[in-house]
Amino acid sequence: RLLIIDFGSQVTQLIARRLRELSVYCEIHPFNKVTDAFLADFAPKAVILSGGPASVFADGAPMPPASLWDYGVPILGICYGQQVMMHCLGGHVERGHGTAEFGRAFVTPTPAKTDLLDGWFQTDREQVWMSHGDHVSKIAPGFEVYGTSPNAPFAIIADPARRFYAVQFHPEVHHTPNGAKFYENFIRIAGFTGDWTMGAYREDAIAKIKQQVGDKRVICGLSGGVDSSVAAVLIHEAIGDQLTCVFVDHGLLRENEAAEVVKMFTENYKIPLIHADESELFLGKLNGVSDPETKRKIIGGLFIDVFQKYANGIEGAEFLAQGTLYPDVIESVSFSGGPSVTIKSHHNVGGLPEKMGLKLVEPLRELFKDEVRALGRELGLPASFIGRHPFPGPGLAIRCPGEITIEKLEILKKADAVFIDQIRKHGLYDDIWQAFVAILPVRTVGVMGDARTYDFACALRAVTSVDGMTADYYPFTHDFLGETATRIINEVQGINRVTYDITSKPPGTIEWE
Ligand code: XMP
């Protein structure tokens, strides 16, 4: 495995992404955790030093452990990582003073040759992305220059004998178009064969789960989403019926969703499943509530109570399975008020394991979202299931502004089903991050046949996004929108007006509440 030492760059995660895409297993750890002992224990086959906002001149500047340089594995330093390498090995770094460089640059090769650049230069120059204040002004003994740019005479340097490589630019970002080739060369030099496949991960994860759990029982909270489903199927492969899934049904799921989840897990996968149908409880407590935050708090609180009640009924359970992903557990370096470490925790069932005295089983902790999908495919989960749009924990409650009633929920489910059917029929589902209907807390007047109607209005919402943090509305054709409005009004009793929400995020949010 490969160790990425994080010095606080905004793009450190991308280094891991690029390596994973090349089927190399790597982990990111913050510099202040990587001590000599940590390094020896981790036993990496290669090390990458990330970029970062600090200056090697600063008091207590972030540094790798002293033993790294004699550890004997290939090292790649990126940006701040390059400066650290030069600072430690006898080169020289200078402060910015007008030579700071941000953005696109072009690197040209020198006559010297290195394996690191095999096939990298497509033409006589290669586009890269720079982002640095300080810069290297003298390279350390043993190093040679292999690439230069007008503002970065030491853009690519290396000491091939020690297999130390360093670059001033960021090969991991999108704006360094040939960055993947660069990493491919580095990992080949380091002796990786790219054997970290999902098939291998599956075998490995199963062995680890067996070893961790032994003959004890595991409870898994199933939401119907991709992460918890993949975790459940994987754990079931490992320990069979020592696993029991608890599916809390709050009555705020989409049309037929609960039935589909129950069918898939009990019939297709034969996984023991408790269908905790508590919709009456949830809808009862939500009765008369229209404030969005109050709705969320009620649902979150009840969810934990209900889950705990059912889990307590499972005798001898010692473990709780969670679909925690790698981005939830990467410790990130933050420099506000001095270097510190912030750990993001998974908050879906926050605090529950401690409260219940359960130990955690988190078989997806090392995976990014797209890797979870790949693992799901490897485990044979249907493609339509794996590609599903995200669905929020509080469910339809936050798509029903104002008071939630059973009547409104039933109308909403039907309208939503028609909208999604339209999107699938037109082959648009996979181009859209998320699509749904929100039922508005307003009735409007219409005319159908010769009669006056007085029914609910609804809003269609469909957005494109990469991570849900920002989003733009999906540019449906007018024909599509017209056809969908007609279908909803004809097929769903209780709606007589359809609108399309064209707000981006920001300033809007994706959900209506
Ligand atoms: P917003 O509405 O904040 O949503 O733009 C961004 C993304 O997060 C989802 N979302 C949630 N997911 N629990 C979840 O598991 C929640 O409480 C929750 N609220 C919003 C939303 O569906 C979108 O994908």
Image (cartoon, rainbow, N blue to C red):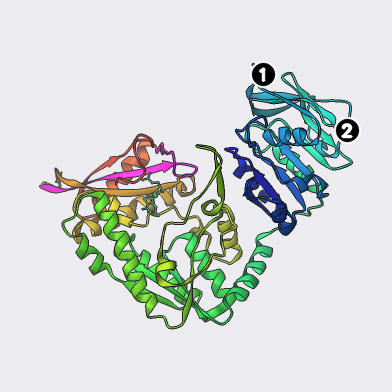
Residue 195 visible at all? no
User: Quick check: 350 left or right of 438?
Assistant: right
Name the spot of residue 197 as percent of width and height, x first: 68, 59
Q: Is residue 382 above or below residue 276?
A: above
Q: Decide whether residue 361 is among the magenta residues.
A: no
Q: Residue furthest top?
A: 98
Q: Residue at x 83, y 35 (%)?
A: 158
Q: Residue at x 61, y 75 (%)?
A: 210
Q: Mark 1 or mark 2, which has the lower sequence index?
A: 1
User: Quick check: 306 left or right of 37?
Assistant: left
Observer-nearest residue: 96 or 174? 96
Image quarter of residue 136: top right
Name the spot of residue 40 as percent of width and height, x first: 74, 56
Q: Residue at x 89, y 29 (%)?
A: 112
The residue labelled by disc 2 is 113
Secondary structure under the numbered disc 2 in the rendered image: loop
Q: Which range is magenta?
A: 452-476
Residue at mark 2: C-beta within 8 A of ligand 1: no
Image quarter of residue 96: top right
Residue 99 — which label?
A: 1
